Image (spheres, rainbow, N blue to C red):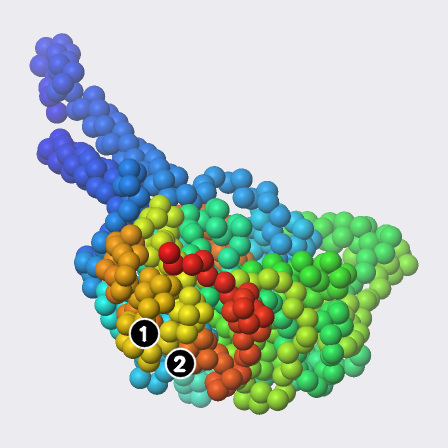
Amino acid sequence: MKGPIVILLVVVAAVVGYFAGGSMNKPAEKKAMAPAAKKAEPAKASGGTLAAVKAKGMLTCGVSTGLPGFSVPDKSNKWAGLDVDVCRAVAAAVLGSADKVKFTPLTAKERFTALQSGEIDILSRNTTWTHTRDTSLGLNFAGVNYYDGQGFMVNTKLGVKSAKELNGAAVCIQAGTTTELNLADYFRFNNLKYKSVVFDTSDQSVKGFESGRCDVLTSDQSQLYALRTKLQNPNNAVVLPEVISKEPLGPVVRQGDDQWFNIVRWTLNAVINAEELGITSSTVDAMKTSKNPSVQRVLGTASDMGKKLGLDNDWAARAIKQVGNYSEMFERNVGKNTPLKISRGLNALWSNGGIMYAPPIR
Amino acid sequence: MSEDPTPSGTPAAKPPPWNDPFIRSIFFQVLAVAILGYFFYFIFDNTLANMAKSGVSTGFAFLSREAGFGILMSLIDYDETYSYGRTFFVGLLNTAVVAASGIVLATLLGFVLGVARLSNNWLISKLAALYIEIFRNVPLLLQIIFWSVAVFQALPRPDKSLQLGDAFFLNNRGLFLPDPVFGAGFEFVTVAFLIAIAGVYFLKNWARKRQESTGQQFPVLYTSLALLIGLPLIVFLIMGMPLSWEYAKLERFSFVGGANIIPEFMALLWALTMYTAAFIAEIVRSGIQAVSHGQSEAAHALGLRNGPTLRLVIIPQAMRVIIPPLTSQYLNLTKNSSLATAIGYPDLVSVFMGTTLNQTGQAVEIVAMTMAVYLTFSLSISMVMNWYNNRVALVER
């Protein structure tokens, strides 16, 4: 009686082991309808993500859990923001419509794992481009869509005028960000002491700051302005003048898929070049008849720049028409007419005093 | 049963090896283990290969790299220049301290509530029932967030703290107490305390033996208390009181100096205690009700009043029923302490599996280490409880 049962169990274990071991060699399949390949074919390093996105008919974009100006859902659950616009531009270029995007809100702690595992195709979540992230996570940064720096926001009642007076303060931060590291470096370098109160999302850190759990809120300056609008009384908080680090924020993709990397990089470059050339979402159709060779190359009327990426020639024109050029994206989301009121500053074009400089499309 | 001794007494022939049940069982067990081992090796190897192909770094070398971030509460020395490995231990100790305190407090509260639930006093028993129903049915995460946001963050700012004299301050940065500073001769006081503990143990044994042989009772409780407090106190006074206090002083942002218990710790501990105590109360109630009513009737017939009956007759028998589910509740409490990330308490998950994972990107190694820690905690707690269970088990079973 015991023998046959043991034999049956062993056979089952063997079969399970064999098939499990065998199937592990195929790319990890997260969802039945979205077989996102984690590693591309070794020979050409192409086609993995682009083909998967086309097959799905949707671009899966990782965004934040709600940061005004960069990625925030409105009342009807429609996402808007600078990072959201990058994804929409890529979707317009690749799939034809900027609305074919599925947004996945991610906290700072899970964002890289979600990209590494194939759950999302592109991470556009105000992520700072750093050496460690570029080299040790298996990811590539496709460009910079916002040049930022880390700053501090304090309660006006404390009468603090400079970051150097913050010895002994309690600081609210978001977990798993470059903010934590920069804060530690700055305070150590200036011989100041602090207590770090760590939260998962920026919403929680704002609440902690508002309730007085901490004296200082530190984050990228753009985030500080955005979070200040969420306060019940924005005049109670003042952003200190010190900018203690460089935070170039941009979209991220997986390593090993150069074609997809090029698509994202050059879509971003196209919208920045569009601002340089004066192409806006309303003038795109008219400018298709332009004689300017640079315009012709961007809009695809006299070149095959799109084909070199694996897309059709209308790729940039669609992105610009449906989402806008960089200045439209900036002004719509974080510019003077929004609650954030951020000026172009560093993010102006290189020809206008800023450092937004996209390589030419030729 | 292939061995049938023949009537003449000659031993039966041994079966061939492939029919021998002993050899067959050994063979198939070895085969099953080998297949299982191969399966795990395959998974492990495949994960490493995939990670290498996609450029994700592997290995445990990251543990010796500098961490670069601060941690709010640490029982050991820590600042940003220590390594990631150190953050692992900081997180581990934080989890251990909240789990241990939670277990002790939840047990005390749970036992009190369980007995109260069975009280003859209608009001007490209904209040206990109300508590149990409320705290059992609200999800723990909501309770933790409630205590953290509605209670501890609502405390006044440091400049307006609730204070007790000049020593104790309660505000939204936590509870500030004077920190004891141990002087030169304090080691003797500690030694005296340990001797007192040993003395209490021997005293208990001696008193029990005396009662068993002569029937005379000895006031063990009061004598033990006197010994535990008195002996170290005498030594303390002899050594010239080598103890001073460092008080917390209010500076620009908050209090500096003294000892600080952060509000996140208090909120988490409070929520865990109240939640688990509700479950423990029900377990205690079921344990007590499992003891047959005849036991308390017999005890009353012998002249024991309610208090000693409960303490000497009912509870020792109820413990057999209480201990196994109580172990589960302890394990639940330990694992539930990982919800600390929701309120910013720097436990193992928040510090190691949160910040360190995000800074190094090595999810597989870090999650594996965290799982190993929780597994070790849980196995240790079960082991201790099983040992205690065996001690109180009735010999007849």
Relative to A234, is A106 on the left or the right?
Answer: left
Q: Residues within 10 Å of mark 2 (few under 14, many from 20)?
A: few
Relative side of B27 to B58, left or right: left
Residue at point 24%, 51% (across, down): A29
Q: Where is residue A315 in the image (x, y as percent from the top left)?
A: 28, 64
| Subunit of label 2 | B
Q: Can residue B146 be seen in this view?
A: no
Local crowd size for mark 1, using a 10 Å CA cut-off: few (<14), some (14–19), many (≥20): some
Question: Which residue lies at the image location 66% right of the left edge and 60% below the top edge?
Answer: A184
Q: Quadrant of residue A87?
A: bottom left
Name the mark on residue B134. 2
Amino acid identity at mark 2 = Ile
Query: Residue A223: x, y in percent?
Result: 53, 74
Residue A11, numbered circle: none
Which residue in the protein does label 1 denote?
Answer: A287
Q: Residue at x 24, y 32 (%)?
A: B35
Q: Are marks 2 and 1 on the same chain?
A: no
Q: Left or right? Give the position of A236 relative to A49.
A: right
Q: Tell me which amino acid carries mark 1.
A: Met
Residue at 48%, 46% (x, y): give it.
A136
Q: Which of A114 and A127 is in front in this view?
A: A127
Q: Say which of marks 2 and 1 sits in front.
A: 1
Question: Quarter holding the C terminus of chain A?
Answer: bottom left
* Residue A86 picture location, percent across and down: 38, 68
Q: In which quarter of the image is the N terminus of chain A?
A: top left
Q: Which chain carries label 1?
A: A
Q: What element carries label 2?
A: helix
- Compared to residue A199, the image places residue B37 above or below, namely above
Any part of residue A209 in sight: yes
Give the left or right position of residue A103, taking residue B265 as reference.
left
Q: Which is more toward the observer, B142 or A163? A: A163
